[in-house]
């Protein structure tokens, strides 16, 4: 059993070492590091299962291996968006931000005032990430809901030990170091560190 856990960790680390970024929430349509430069969804054009996503106080989270990057979050409403829909959505992004550390990043996405967003509406969230080597794409298919079962906003934790509120302002960190980061985030931080070391 210990060997299987070690092997699984090694495989995760090797795949993360070659990745530029991984969309960890909501669930991505799919991930292929070689296809990430292919818009609009990193080579995954077919819709996947939809994740229930809250209209208010939602967030997206990624795992990045770059020390600095920019991130644009676009939202396309509808059941089966075409490439032109993503192009139109890019002109009015739902959020544009930057990340100045490798590892886990969490970014607010409050869609309550987004034009056309409503309870039970289908949507696709597109992330356009740039860590300095060109734009990379991933998408998540969601259904917008007023209350998403199992959604836990406290899981929105950045690698810099600060939680991010829905306004995009990070409150002062509490505690010190990785000990105050939830287990999920600590695991992602450790994975990122190992991935960065393997890429040297």
Image (cartoon, helix red, strand yellow):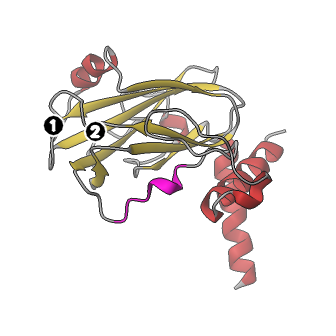
Residue under pointer 1: 78
Which of these two is toward me, 52 or 139?
52
State whether residue 141 is above or below residue 70: below
Which mark sits nearer the N-terminus, 2 or 1? 1
Is residue 155 in the magenta section? Answer: yes
Residue at the location (75% across, 79% down)? 3
**Labels 2 & 1 near each other (Cβ < 8 A):** yes
Residue 165 picture location, percent across and down = 49, 41
Horizontal relation, residue 193 to residue 64: left or right = right
Is residue 82 in the magenta section? Answer: no
- Mark identifier at residue 156: none
Horizontal relation, residue 119 to residue 16: left or right = left
What span is in magenta? Answer: 150-156
| Residue sticking out furthest to the top | 91
- Count neighbours of disc 1 (C-alpha within 10 A) and say few if under 14, some if 14 to 19, many if 20 or more: some
Residue 190 picture location, percent across and down = 74, 55
């Amino acid at each position: 059993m210990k060997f299987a856990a070690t092997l699984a960790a090694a495989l995760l680390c090797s795949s993360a070492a070659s990745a530029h970024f991984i969309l960890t929430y909501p669930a991505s349509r799919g991930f292929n590091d070689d296809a990430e430069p292919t818009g609009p969804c990193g080579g995954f054009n077919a819709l996947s299962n939809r994740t229930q996503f809250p209209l208010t106080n939602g967030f997206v989270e990624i795992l990045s291996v770059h020390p600095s990057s920019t991130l644009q979050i676009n939202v396309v409403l509808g059941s089966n968006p075409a490439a032109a829909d993503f192009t139109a959505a890019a002109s009015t992004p739902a959020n544009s931000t930057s990340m100045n550390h490798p590892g886990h990043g969490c970014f607010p996405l409050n869609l309550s005032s987004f034009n056309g967003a409503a309870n039970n509406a289908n949507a696709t969230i597109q992330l356009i990430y740039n860590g300095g080597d060109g734009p990379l794409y991933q998408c998540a298919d969601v259904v917008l809901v007023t209350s998403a079962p199992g959604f836990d906003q406290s899981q929105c934790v950045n690698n810099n030990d600060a939680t991010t509120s829905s306004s995009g302002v990070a409150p002062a960190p509490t505690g010190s170091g990785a000990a105050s980061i939830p287990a999920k985030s600590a695991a992602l931080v450790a994975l990122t560190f190992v991935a960065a070391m393997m890429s040297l």
